[in-house]
Image: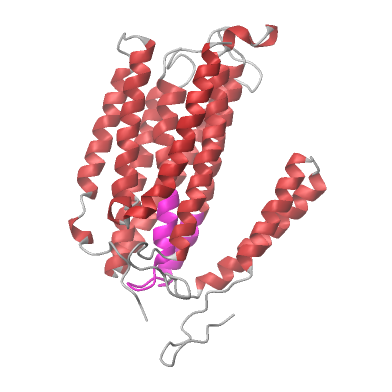
Amino acid sequence: MAHSGPAGHAEEEHHGSRWPVIIAVGMAVGYVGIVTPSIPILLVGFVVFVAGTGGWVHDDMRRPSSPFYGVGTAIESAFPRVSARKLGTWLLLVTEIMFFSAIIGASWTLRLRTTTLGPDFQGPWAAPNQILNVPLTGLNTFILICSSVTMVEAFAAAEKGDQKRLRLFLLATLILGIAFVSIQAYEYQKLYFQEGLTFKSAPYGVNPLYGATFYAQTGVHGTHVTAGVLALAYVTRKAFRGGFTKENHEAVELVGLYWHFVDVVWIFLFPIVYLLPA
Amino acid sequence: MTREPPGSEAHAKRPYLIVFVALAAVTIIELFVYSIPLAHIEIISILMATATIKGGLVVGYYMHLRYEPRWLAFIPLAGLALVAVLVAALTSTSAHP
């Protein structure tokens, strides 16, 4: 879908792509499969989602990554232009805020009502560091903060057109992100198999909901971090192929926005889950 | 035709490192606070305040919201307003089971 523009507006890029729609359809079908529930429908949705993502990656890898400000005129004085994709990313982040509020809010409510939940959910909440490993997770928090610094440095390098610095800092961010997920995975298997913190039970007579809410909150966050790592891997690969320039590097900025958001969620989640007293 | 996006100037002067030091320092404070024998409500208040400071620093400086057109900030603020409503509703219902 190409623009017809005034003479001189070169066909350097067109802004239409079928892949976002296909990805969205895949996600919608997958969601239907989750809530029905129906494994076949979920699988169909998943396949469409993966195929759409693959197609988008294939198309994007060889294209410039430049901002698009929309066709037509804008009310310049009232609403200075923000690129369409950046606006879309911020809207995505707001939906994610709502998603995390739901998970964290529900877990918080259950925690406040442990005395009124019925015979199967008796027991106090665990104290900080009683079951969970606060020092290790504190280190993990630091790792995630570092990854936000390296991410913003990568973006600054992209803005200057410094290819070497961009690649270095994207790679650093990717490695730190993988480290975070790995440490979480290590903690999970230790908690589940050695400490006895499962979805339905907890050690030391602690309320069974402690495990369920812990895995729900940190698991949902960890899934988001993993998705971020995959996006980072893509952007890093594109950077190493010389796919970004001083003029065309919007993907670095947008992946950065998502990554910082994942860090902000953890900034709140870490004290709530790990540090608050019983 | 490339348009210069607003807020991309003077990147070299942005305080990324200072913000990082602040984030690290506040995190260390948090790791000590939880072991101090304070009342529950005091610990919760302090930790939520430090989290808000850290979150604000990341959103303002790393996500560049401070350098973007003002109206863009209303989008995450609207989301946070919804969160505030949810937290208020959950806390009040939990107080009276």
- Whether residue A242 appears in magenta in the rendering, the answer is yes
Instruction: Tell me where residue A194 sits by quadrant.
Output: top right
Q: Using the rendered image of the protein, determine whether residue A189 is visible from the camera's viewpoint.
A: no
Closest to the observer, A232 or B79? B79
Q: How is the image coloured?
A: secondary structure
Residue extending farthest to the left is: B13
Above or below for A231 versus A97 = below
Which SS type dominates the magenta stretch?
helix
Instruction: Tell me where residue A122 sits by quadrant.
Output: top right
Q: Say whether residue A25 is left or right of residue A126.
A: right
- Whether residue A83 appears in magenta in the rendering, the answer is no
Q: Using the rendered image of the protein, determine whether residue A47 is visible from the camera's viewpoint.
A: yes
Give the residue displayed 49% in from the left and 61% down from the top. Answer: A234
Give the residue displayed 38% in from the left and 12% down from the top. Answer: B40
Residue B35 drawn at (x, y percent):
33, 14
Above or below for A149 versus A278 = below
Above or below for A251 versus B29 = below
Give the residue displayed 31% in from the left and 10% down from the top. Answer: B38
Residue A110 drawn at (x, y percent):
58, 18
- Please provide the residue range marked out in magenta: A231-259
Q: Say whether residue A214 is left or right of residue B42.
A: right
Give the residue displayed 69% in from the left and 58% down from the top. Answer: A25
Q: Say whether residue A124 is left or right of residue B72.
A: right
Residue A73 drawn at (x, y percent):
43, 74
Q: Say whether residue A101 is left or right of residue B64.
A: right
Residue A178 drawn at (x, y percent):
46, 45
Instruction: Tell me where residue B76 sits by quadrant.
Output: top left
- Position of the N terminus of chain A, as image quadrant, is bottom right
Closest to the observer, A97 or A34? A97
Closest to the observer, B10 or A171? B10
